[in-house]
Image: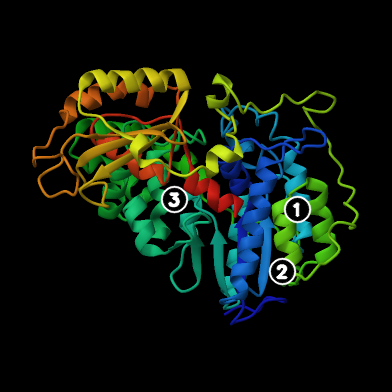
């Protein structure tokens, strides 16, 4: 065990992959702008709600002794010096996300949490370095992230990943499920399989499954490359020989630098309560009224109305000086993507009799036409199992507005709980219904909305349908609450 000033055995370090969360919140949540000037703040709102929930939840369980938010300092890192193509194909950040980057750092500091970054290094490198220092001192580490690139750091009993949405801890078993190898061998698998998202080349023709089989058989990347001539499959053997150096470069790209310099000593990461008034002033400046009330209640602030908002600098606001378009709440525009329904419509009593069970092709065609006119719709699947691999599709629910929905039974059996009168199950053929709905479910211009829609996407994928694009209300709820 190595002594590191500022942290010791028995301590618990939480490292938040802040840059990863910003993008996740941006893409998961509907657009949000500050009413006073149109400043985009959706990702900031999601980040603040996540951080507040994490801090409050930790009070009821095992509290971290150290906590930090880790950010990317820019789009370039030391990896670009030896492989200029690394992440070079990525498009620029969305214009409405750019002004939120500094605001998220301000938010972190308002919560009393250090915002850490270092030019030339990625957030993942700093997470690896802080995790190494803490683990060497005998402390435990929890990394708040779902980034697969961080799975190489997992050490059971010492370093764990926690998905910020599912609140699920990930250890060696989960890494094995994802990559087919233990954490220490993840970089070898990634070196072979590559990563198109980061422009890591890997070895052509080798995916994660094959890479895992090879690493499990030969031990590690260098041993595999040294014995590539023993591979029986001609194409695989030739690829490993031809692209051996490319695989080595790929490993250099994916392995995290656990010896990166620490921008701030670990002793600076000790957990302190935020200054309630400074935090409230920041939230007031952002116009996050709901979270402001929650913070006021948590810290017993009774003068929120008279509290002066913080002076938060905005370096770039694409909406500055522009009049904001009013949110449509009536007519056809109210059904467009991003529209908001009247509060009265959302709270109206549910009229069960208004919902329809679709049993004929003519009614199915009518609903398809209605969905195409709406431009977006809610979708949910009814199946025989919670396991996506075992489940069979028995019905599909669709909705285009509050009180305007239908259910399409396609494979129900007797005793399934639906009243089909006279015990005769009148339903459409599953293959016919899916063939009709496939163009809608795959239409990029039609937004699909669902609760835990990842499950539904898996179900549709089992039948050859790629559900996209979609919003997941479960993810939205987590980020907002």
Residue 307 visible in the snapshot = yes
Q: Earlier in the sequence, mark 3 or mark 1?
A: 1
Q: How is the image coloured?
A: rainbow
Residue at 83% in and 48% down: 285
Q: Horizontal and vertical percent for residue 203?
A: 37, 35
Q: Horizontal and vertical percent for residue 329?
A: 62, 28
Residue at 17% in and 39% down: 232
Of the numbered discs in the image, which one, if any, rests on residue 107? 1
CA distance separating discs 3 and 2: 43 Å
Q: From the viewer's perspective, tell me whether residue 205 is left or right of residue 110.
A: left
| Structural crowding at the residue carrying mark 1, measured as other residues with C-alpha within 10 Å and reported as few (<14), some (14–19) or many (≥20) | many
Q: Earlier in the sequence, mark 1 or mark 2?
A: 1
Q: Earlier in the sequence, mark 3 or mark 2?
A: 3
Residue 265 visible in the snapshot = no
Of labels 1 and 2, the one closer to you? 2
- The picture quadrant where one finds residue 275 is bottom right
Of labels 3 and 2, the one closer to you? 2
Q: Which residue is mark 3?
A: 187
Up-down: is 286 above or below 92? below
Q: Which residue is mark 2?
A: 298
Seen from the viewer's position, the closer of residues 290 and 320 is 290
Label 2 residue SS: helix
Q: From the viewer's perspective, tell me whether residue 436 is left or right of residue 325.
A: left
Quadrant where the N terminus sits is bottom right
Q: Horizontal and vertical percent for residue 353?
A: 34, 38
CA distance separating discs 1 and 2: 17 Å
Up-down: is 256 above or below 171? above
- The picture quadrant where one finds residue 115 is bottom right
Label 1 residue SS: helix
Of the numbered discs in the image, which one, if any, rests on residue 342? none
| Structural crowding at the residue carrying mark 2, measured as other residues with C-alpha within 10 Å and reported as few (<14), some (14–19) or many (≥20) | few
């Amino acid at each position: 065990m190595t002594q590191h000033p500022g942290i010791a055995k028995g301590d618990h370090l939480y490292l938040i992959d802040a840059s990863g969360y910003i993008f996740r919140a941006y893409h998961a949540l509907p657009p949000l702008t500050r009413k006073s000037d149109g400043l985009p703040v959706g990702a900031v709102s999601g980040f603040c709600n996540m951080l507040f929930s994490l801090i409050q939840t930790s009070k009821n369980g095992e509290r971290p002794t150290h906590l930090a938010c880790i950010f990317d300092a820019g789009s370039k890192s030391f990896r670009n010096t030896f492989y200029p193509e690394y992440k070079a194909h990525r498009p620029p950040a969305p214009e409405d996300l750019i002004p939120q980057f500094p605001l998220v750092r301000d938010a972190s500091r308002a919560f009393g949490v250090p915002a850490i970054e270092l030019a030339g290094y990625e957030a993942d490198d700093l997470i690896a370095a802080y995790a190494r220092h803490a683990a060497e001192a005998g402390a435990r580490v929890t990394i708040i992230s779902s980034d697969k690139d961080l799975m190489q750091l997992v050490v059971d009993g010492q370093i764990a990943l926690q998905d910020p949405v599912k609140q699920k801890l990930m250890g060696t078993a989960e890494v094995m499920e994802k990559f087919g190898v233990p954490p220490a061998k993840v970089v070898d698998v990634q070196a072979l399989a590559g990563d198109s998202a980061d422009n890591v080349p890997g070895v052509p023709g080798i995916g994660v499954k094959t890479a895992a089989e090879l690493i499990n058989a030969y031990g590690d990347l260098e041993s595999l490359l040294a014995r590539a001539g023993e591979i029986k499959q001609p194409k695989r053997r030739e690829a490993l020989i031809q692209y051996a150096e490319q695989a080595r470069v790929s490993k250099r790209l994916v392995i995290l630098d656990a010896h990166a310099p620490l921008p701030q000593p670990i002793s600076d990461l000790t957990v302190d309560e935020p200054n309630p008034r400074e935090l409230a002033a920041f939230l007031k400046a952002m116009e996050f009224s709901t979270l402001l009330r929650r913070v006021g209640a948590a810290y017993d602030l009774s003068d929120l109305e008279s509290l002066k908002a913080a002076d938060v600098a905005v370096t770039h606001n694409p909406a500055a000086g522009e009049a904001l378009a009013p949110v449509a709440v009536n007519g056809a525009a109210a059904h467009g993507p991003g529209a908001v329904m009247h509060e009265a419509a959302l709270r109206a009593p549910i009229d069960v009799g208004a919902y329809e069970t679709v049993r004929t092709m003519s009614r199915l065609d009518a609903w398809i036409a209605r969905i195409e006119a709406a431009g977006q719709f809610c979708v949910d699947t009814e199946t025989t199992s919670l396991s996506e691999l075992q489940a069979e599709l028995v019905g599909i629910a669709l909705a285009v507005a509050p009180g305007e929905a239908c259910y399409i039974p396609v494979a129900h059996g007797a005793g399934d709980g639906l009243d089909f009168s006279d015990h005769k199950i009148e339903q459409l053929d599953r293959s016919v219904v899916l063939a009709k709905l496939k163009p809608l479910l795959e239409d990029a211009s039609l937004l699909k909305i669902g609760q835990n829609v990842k499950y539904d996407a898996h179900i549709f994928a089992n039948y050859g349908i790629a559900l996209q694009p979609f919003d997941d209300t479960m993810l939205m709820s987590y980020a907002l609450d």
